[in-house]
Image: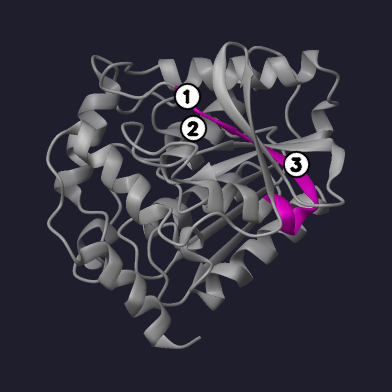
Amino acid sequence: MSMAEIDSVRALLTGRPRPVGWTQRRARMEEVCAADGIPPGITFTPAEIAGIPAEWSAAPGSDASRVLLFLHGGGYCSGSIVSHRTMAGGVGKAAGIRTLALGFRLAPENPFPAALDDARAAFEALLAQGFAPQDIAVGGDSAGGGLSLALMVSLRDAGRPLPGCAWLASPWVDLAMTGATMETKDAVDPLIHRGYLEELAGAYCGGADRADPLVSPLHADLRGLPPVLVQVGSAETLLDDAVRIAGRLGAADVPVRLEVWPHMIHAWMLWSARLTDGRRALASAGAFLRGRGV
């Protein structure tokens, strides 16, 4: 990988001051995350599931019997179907399956457990449509990674069927921010810093305890979950979130694979059009999803 590639993404992210206010932040996230346009060779179709806005994406030859329920990042307060098309469509294409990106409700207007309720409703609706549990994968980046884990824990505790596997990209699983890399990687992470996460966590949690396992799955009982792929960049303040959740999944006898990508930043697959390692990471995730974690 050429360092010029990741430097171009860093320049995109830091070229202007951080916006203020939720409306401006949401607009800015769509702007920078979708800066490279819609991936070629993928069809995007607006949809609705369980009354929630969604979008199907599929490349030619995709297996229509299998689906990735994609939950976008953005700290539960930003991010959208539009901002994450590159990631959702790209990983589906790599896996040879369809992707359903979910426009779940955002905080602070809709704090916990709104996003989890929407994810649960969408998963149950896919089952009702005839998808076999093992033919549904769940996954997402950042908060979407944490939400994917919370969804699986919630389903398991309710005695419901579980998805076939899960993909967690740069997952945010500890809303108390206790990982050491919150400090040790702060100088090299262009996106995610403690103060920013504190604001997001406060908006999402409302009156909920940040140690609640459905808020911070790092604290959950993880036994009985399906295979999980965790991908993270070495230049992330959330590196410890990924490393610790992979360790706890392994300790709970869950099949898990951890990939740490040198020099990569938070959710770098969003810019796979300009990042060789973004394309490689999506290819790796696609192979994992195609094989159902085997």
Q: Is residue 98 magenta?
A: yes
Residue type pointed to by label 1:
Phe
Q: Residues within 10 Å of mark 1 (few under 14, many from 20)?
A: many
Q: Residue shown at 16%/61% (left/top)?
A: 16
Q: Which mark is residue 121?
A: none
Do labels 1 and 2 touch, CB within 8 Å?
Answer: yes
**SS type, badge 2:** helix
Q: Which mark is residue 98?
A: 3
In magenta, the rendered stretch is: 92-104
Q: Position of residue 127 (x, y in %)?
A: 78, 18
Residue type pointed to by label 2:
Leu
Q: Is residue 241 visible?
A: yes
Q: Which residue is disc 2 drawn over? A: 147
Q: Which residue is disc 1 drawn over? A: 104
Q: Position of residue 292 (x, y in %)?
A: 80, 47
Query: Residue 150 or 264: which is nearer the viewer?
Result: 264
Query: Residue 169 or 108: which is nearer the viewer?
Result: 108
Residue type pointed to by label 3:
Arg
**SS type, badge 3:** strand
Q: Vertical placement of 106 versus 271: above or below?
A: above
Gap between marks 1 and 2, in whole Å?
11 Å
Q: Position of residue 168 (x, y in %)?
A: 55, 48
Q: Is residue 14 magenta?
A: no
Q: Residues within 10 Å of mark 2 (few under 14, many from 20)?
A: many
Q: Residue shown at 59%/18% (left/top)?
A: 120
Q: Nearer the viewer, mark 1 or mark 2?
A: 1
**SS type, badge 1:** loop
Lower position in the chain sequence, tag 1 or tag 2: 1
Q: Position of residue 286 (x, y in %)?
A: 72, 57
Q: Is residue 256 visible?
A: no
